[in-house]
Amino acid sequence: MNQTTHLESDSYWITFCIDKNLGLIQKVESRVRIPSDLRELASAESLDTFTLIYTDILVHQPDCPPEVVEKLVGLREGIPWKDAKEVVQECKEIYENSLVNGNPPKAGFVFPKVKSLSASKGSLWRKLT
């Protein structure tokens, strides 16, 4: 084999490995994005920040219900009830506006499996209203 053939062969294998692993990297990024976005949401300090982050979450996980925000706001200390109620209401409106024929545009892989969201007994929203 001459030098050119070795370079072509090496180039092929490098490209193959990058292409193969790039798909894996993108899968990992999409899976890591959810907890990362939820961490940002949990640490939000203002109504605008909550709504901006929640809107971003809906871009990647359109079936993320506003109950996620409700539970995170309920766990936070130092947020006045009035502000918490406003955050939850804004996020519910954002979610409802994102629905297509009453359903999320596409199903995600996380939120349908979260059982604590389906049983909303004693939810913050009920306490606030």
Image (tube, rainbow, N blue to C red):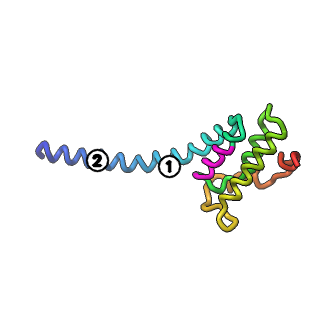
Mark 1 surroundings: few (<14), some (14-19) or many (≥20) residues within 10 A: few
Which residue is rendered at x = 63% and y = 55% of the image? 62
Horizontal and vertical percent for residue 6? 18, 44
Q: Amino acid at mark 2?
A: Trp
Residue tagged 2: 13
Horizontal and vertical percent for residue 120? 82, 52
Which residues fall within the magenta stretch?
51-59
Closer to the camera in the image, 113 or 123: 123
Residue tagged 1: 27
Q: Residue furthest top?
A: 78
Give left or right: position of 43 versus 15. right
Q: Is 56 a magenta residue?
A: yes
Mark 2 surroundings: few (<14), some (14-19) or many (≥20) residues within 10 A: few
Which residue is rendered at x = 63% and y = 49% of the image? 55
Give the label, 2 or 1, closer to the camera: 1
Q: How many marks?
A: 2
**Circle 1 SS class:** helix
Callouts 2 and 1 close, C-beta under 8 Å: no
**Circle 2 SS class:** helix
Q: Earlier in the sequence, mark 2 or mark 1?
A: 2
Q: Is 115 a magenta residue?
A: no
